[in-house]
Image (cartoon, coloured by chain):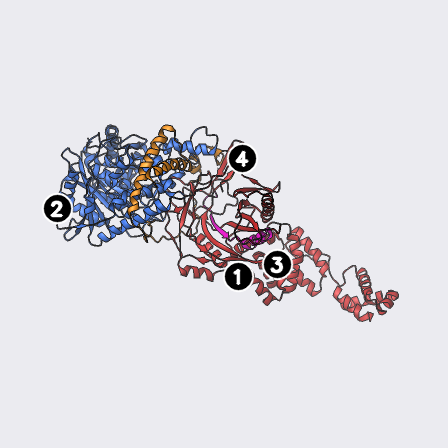
């Protein structure tokens, strides 16, 4: 494999979280909408209708461009991309071709495995198409839902900078997080509001020219992207090693079978006949608008992590984890604001909370414990009311039950020093042999004494006080 | 390129264009359309005489600085009426012959 | 013919407001006239009698109460079948929309409705506005009321013929390369193509988006001014519509053109123009001089490239605009198609006429990979030169006077099979379309064989008022606009 180098470029289509569609006033948020209910004459391409640009979508695109360091064009042009398909009412998609809204920029990927700046080529605005459904009960028919026609999209095109499926996956995760951070996209691959097409080719290590590439479309999870790329790189390697030539084509990823497949229909070379859309004037974005948007950009992950280290005194690695998801970072800050010490809050979230969230798709949004309650729980530990171990149990119960308050139940910790002291004294008195072993240098025997005190108090003694007292008295 | 060869190329191009535009022609009408297309496209040669070096193309005869639409939802109110127009429906959907793979 | 139908828009409107007659009576009269006289002309594609009567009743109520009266309140009007009208079949004279009944109104239709106009029907046209003779209609050709063997022009042939024959007091058409001005000239009536962007295009079925414009056709300039005032103005649903305020066009009709400068472009009077047309237009120049205008020669050097330029740009835009007619969501869908491409291909082939198919093929060609630069981009550059020619010339004169057409109305069938021959009909109207400038066509003569000749005045951007005033002054000094054979 190291004989060849993989070259990967990614095109991401992200749905912008605007209220209305790109070129008409229909609702753009389709969650829960019945089929063909968020439509109008414009987005269904009725005769005589015309598009009008949604300024909110443009503003979101400018936000993304600025966050990724792109150059925002003061004048960009909408173009028609012409082809026939049932989910494309006008018979053309309004997109941007040779004069897109943003040029250049980059995505700084900094994860456990990847530390690389991936260059972007461009970002442009366009409209989404409708949906075709194939399993509505007729084997000979397909069904069209136009709700999604006209939903605003940005297309983000990377340079061919990635060299491994992991890099590609990390790029996507980072990019997705930026968009979610900006509040411009929900970033949910399964729901289809963040889609990825991948281009991959291989070339002999050290060669400058790119090999022939294949394209894979609409992979619907980050893992699928990584697996599809890994498969395709291997497939291309086998082809070339076998003396063959890679064919430039679009391949479908068959997730169940774990392989890419040729498309059954022969792909004609597409001639989209792009030309500037005469129904839309060039999009003028004055510098004042760009500066206004720049001033309104939220704190992005990198800056937030640095601030957490500086202001809250937590470790860099932990800050990176917390700020990976903006909502998680917000949750953390609310726990701190509610009075919990920052480092403790951070530890709790990273260990206990994230363990619970590990297998959910929605992440922190699925957590039923309010930040204020987690803070309360942490404070109880600090006050000595309960031990850390007790708190973990209470926490798990709260998470399962989705309970609305912190109920310590029967948990209470003995933190009365004199009470513990009398038990410690009794335990020491009852175990002269171990006392002699400890005084003889076997310091590990401390654990035995701790265990005995805990047994005697049914686990309720405050472990910190127990340790302190034992240390003092065992000397 | 000699004019005759260009005319032959236009003939082949007409068939390609018809395919791109989803138009079908039977033998008779194909001949007519090829003849007419050749005549029309040949006429375009006139423009070769014009020196357009350094001239900007006009996409819009009149430049208007359009006000962008504010991001507000306004339902059309005629969603049902729009689907009623469809030649073939099934429930809330417009029906088409089975589609195998995506255009994308 | 009923005397009421001989009255123009201004007079009809006044008499309705004065209570001389009710809208319902007038509407009934028009409907009967249409029924008895239209078969010989074939200007009407759809007559909506029930809707008309309901609208007339509502208008009468308004007129009686005296509230909210507009110039068009209660006036029975028919308009080109390119305007999307809610609940009334809109076909663009194509089989592909043969049964299409829109569930919404376009902006122009809304405006007419809001003012209480009474829609009597939709008028015949060349299919998808592509034509200069109204012979390319799925509903049969329209006959010129002056001579039924001849074409009324196109694509707004039905509109011009209906106005000329007194089947509507005034009407609306659309003009992309001359489709209002040329039929107006061929039918001896007045037709105005406003500045591009002056009237909303939302709700006119698109042919060539950067050229299409809505405009009035009527038997005199005053009526055109009234119609323009009723429909002009910015529309937020049309991103190309101009936000400029709409002047009072009637107020602008002072009839005084002393000191105005009129430019005569030498390139418009070259070989190929019918001598009687040339004589009539030069005669009009003399009248304008007598009325106090100064006449001078101007040059529009790139005129001869306009037709080629237009027939690249317009079909290119049309090829994309007509892609929505795919049989999926409305309109004609071919029966029994087993798979998708067959459905697209057969629906469109069955639905479109040969001229439309030709222009789609040509338009697709000039946009296609490898040809875009040499054709489409080149044409757009030539377009800039043509527009600059006009703006230079109009820097030194208030309006340009030219013929509207190279010949008087030709015979039906004469040019239908030779596209270039047909396209050259538009040689005088196309340039102003490419430049987006307003153009007013009006009668300025009658040939020895009794056929109308029209002249054209081309003005500065948004100077419709100026053009209409020159036309009004000319009309007051001449009788050509009265020669229309009202009873067809």
The residue labelled by disc 3 is: A321
> Where does the magenta region start and end?
A147-175
Residue for point 42% across, 56% down: A73
* Structural distance between the alpha carbons of marks 1 and 4: 45 Å
User: Which chain's colour is blue?
Assistant: C
Select label 3 or label 4 by which is in front.
Answer: 3
- Residue C264 vertical position relative to residue A141 in the rendered view, above or below: below
For the residues beneath circles 3 and 1, the answer to whether they share a chain is yes
Q: Residue furthest left?
A: C290
The residue labelled by disc 2 is: C286
How far across and how far down the image is residue A301, in percent? 56, 60
User: Which chain's colour is red?
Assistant: A
Mark 3 in CB contact with mark 4 (< 8 angstroms): no
The answer to whether residue C350 is left or right of residue C27 is right
Mark 1 in CB contact with mark 2 (< 8 angstroms): no
Mark 2, secondary structure of its residue: helix
* Structural distance between the alpha carbons of marks 3 and 1: 16 Å
The disc placed on residue C81 is none
How far across and how far down the image is residue C310, in percent? 30, 43
Mark 3 in CB contact with mark 2 (< 8 angstroms): no
Select label 3 or label 2 by which is in front.
Answer: 2
Which badge, 3 or 1, comes first in the chain's sequence? 1
């Amino acid at each position: 494999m190291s004989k060849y180098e993989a070259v990967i470029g990614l095109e991401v289509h992200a749905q912008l979280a605007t209220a209305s569609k790109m070129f008409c006033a229909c609702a753009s948020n389709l969650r829960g909408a019945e089929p063909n209910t968020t439509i109008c004459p414009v987005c269904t391409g009725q005769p005589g209708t015309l598009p009008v640009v949604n300024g909110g979508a443009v503003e979101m695109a400018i936000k993304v461009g600025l966050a990724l360091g792109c150059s925002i064009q003061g004048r960009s042009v909408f173009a028609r991309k012409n082809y026939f398909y049932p989910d494309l009412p006008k018979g053309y998609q309004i997109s941007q071709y040779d004069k897109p809204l943003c040029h250049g920029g980059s995505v700084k990927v900094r994860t456990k495995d990847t530390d690389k700046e991936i260059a972007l080529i461009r970002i442009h605005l366009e409209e989404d198409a409708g949906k075709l459904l194939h399993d509505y009960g007729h084997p000979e028919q397909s069904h069209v839902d136009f709700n999604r026609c006209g939903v605003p999209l940005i297309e983000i095109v990377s340079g061919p900078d990635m060299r491994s499926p992991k890099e590609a996956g990390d790029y996507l995760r980072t990019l997705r997080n930026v968009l979610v951070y900006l509040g411009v996209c929900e970033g949910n691959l399964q729901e289809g509001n963040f889609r990825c097409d991948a281009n991959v080719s291989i070339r002999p290590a050290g060669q400058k020219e790119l090999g022939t590439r294949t394209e894979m479309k609409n992979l619907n999870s980050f893992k699928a992207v990584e697996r599809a790329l890994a498969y395709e790189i291997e497939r291309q390697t086998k082809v070339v090693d076998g003396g063959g030539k890679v064919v430039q084509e679009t391949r479908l990823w068959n997730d169940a079978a774990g392989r890419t497949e040729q498309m059954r229909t022969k792909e004609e070379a597409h001639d989209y006949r792009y030309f500037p859309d005469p129904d839309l004037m060039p999009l003028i974005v004055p510098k004042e608008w760009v500066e206004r948007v720049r001033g309104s950009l939220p704190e992005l992950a990198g800056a937030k992590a640095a601030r957490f280290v500086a202001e809250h005194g937590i470790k860099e690695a932990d800050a990176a984890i917390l700020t990976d998801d903006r909502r998680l970072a917000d949750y953390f800050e609310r726990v701190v604001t509610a009075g919990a010490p920052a480092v403790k809050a951070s530890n709790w979230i990273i260990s206990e909370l994230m363990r619970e969230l590990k297998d959910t798709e929605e992440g922190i949004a699925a957590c039923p414990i309010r930040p204020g309650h987690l803070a309360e729980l942490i404070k109880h530990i600090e006050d000595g009311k309960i031990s850390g171990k007790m708190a973990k149990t209470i926490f798990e119960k709260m998470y399962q039950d989705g309970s609305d308050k912190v109920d310590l139940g029967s948990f209470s910790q003995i933190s009365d020093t004199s009470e513990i002291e009398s038990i410690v004294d009794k335990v020491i008195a009852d175990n002269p042999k171990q006392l002699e072993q400890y005084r003889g240098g076997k310091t590990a025997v401390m654990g035995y004494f701790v265990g005995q005190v805990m047994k005697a108090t049914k686990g309720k003694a405050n472990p910190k006080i127990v340790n302190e007292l034992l240390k003092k008295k065992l000397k | 390129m000699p004019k005759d060869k260009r005319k032959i190329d236009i003939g082949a191009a007409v068939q390609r264009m018809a395919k791109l535009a989803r138009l079908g022609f039977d033998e008779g009408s194909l001949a007519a359309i090829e003849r007419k297309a050749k005549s029309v496209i040949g006429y375009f040669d006139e423009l070769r005489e014009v020196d357009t070096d350094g001239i900007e193309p006009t996409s819009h005869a009149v430049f208007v600085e359009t006000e962008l639409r504010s991001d507000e939802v306004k339902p059309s109110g005629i969603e049902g009426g729009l689907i009623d127009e469809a030649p073939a429906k099934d429930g809330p959907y417009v029906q088409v012959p089975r589609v195998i793979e995506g255009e994308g | 013919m009923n005397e009421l139908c001989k009255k123009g828009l201004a007079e009809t409107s006044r008499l309705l407001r004065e209570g001389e007659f009710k809208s319902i009576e007038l509407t009934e009269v028009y409907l009967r006239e249409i029924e008895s006289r239209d078969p010989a002309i074939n200007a009407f594609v759809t007559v909506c009698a029930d809707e008309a009567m309901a609208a007339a009743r509502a208008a009468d109520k308004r007129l009686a109460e005296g509230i909210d009266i507009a110039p068009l309140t209660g006036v029975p009007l028919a308009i080109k079948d390119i305007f999307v009208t809610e609940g009334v079949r809109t076909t663009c004279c194509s089989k592909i929309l043969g049964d299409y009944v829109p569930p919404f109104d376009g902006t122009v239709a809304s405006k007419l409705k809001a003012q209480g106009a009474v829609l009597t029907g939709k008028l015949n046209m060349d299919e998808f506005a592509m034509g200069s003779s109204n012979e390319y209609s799925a509903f049969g050709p329209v006959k010129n009321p002056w001579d039924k063997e001849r074409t009324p022009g196109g694509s707004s042939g039905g509109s011009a013929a209906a106005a000329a024959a007194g089947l509507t007091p005034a009407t609306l058409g659309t003009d992309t390369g001359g489709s209002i001005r040329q039929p107006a000239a061929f039918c001896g009536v007045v037709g105005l193509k406003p500045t591009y962007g002056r009237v909303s295009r939302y709700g006119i079925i698109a042919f060539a988006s950067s050229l299409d414009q809505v405009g009035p056709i009527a038997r005199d300039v005053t009526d055109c001014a009234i119609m323009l005032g009723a429909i002009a103005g910015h529309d937020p649903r049309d991103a190309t519509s101009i936000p400029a305020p709409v002047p009072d066009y009637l107020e602008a009709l002072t009839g005084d053109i002393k000191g105005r400068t009129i430019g005569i472009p030498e390139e418009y009077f070259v070989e190929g123009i019918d001598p009687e047309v040339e004589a009539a237009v030069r005669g009009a120049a003399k009248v304008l001089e007598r009325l106090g205008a100064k006449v001078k020669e101007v040059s529009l050097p790139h005129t001869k490239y306009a037709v080629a330029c237009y027939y690249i740009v317009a079909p290119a835009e049309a090829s994309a605009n007509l892609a929505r007619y795919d049989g999926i969501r409305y309109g004609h869908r071919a029966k029994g198609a087993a798979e998708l491409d067959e459905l697209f291909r057969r629906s469109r082939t069955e639905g479109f006429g040969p001229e439309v198919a030709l222009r789609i093929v040509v338009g697709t060609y000039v946009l296609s990979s490898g040809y875009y630069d040499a054709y489409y981009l080149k044409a757009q550059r030539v377009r800039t030169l043509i527009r600059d020619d006009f703006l230079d010339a109009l820097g030194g004169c208030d309006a340009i006077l030219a013929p509207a057409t190279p010949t008087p109305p030709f015979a039906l069938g004469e040019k239908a099979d030779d596209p270039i021959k047909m396209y050259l009909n538009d040689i005088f109207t196309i340039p102003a379309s490419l430049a987006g400038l307003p153009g007013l066509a009006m009668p300025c003569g009658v040939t020895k064989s009794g056929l109308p000749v029209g002249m054209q005045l081309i003005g500065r951007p948004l100077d419709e008022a100026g053009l209409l005033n020159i036309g009004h002054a000319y009309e007051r000094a001449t009788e050509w606009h009265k020669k229309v054979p009202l009873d067809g």
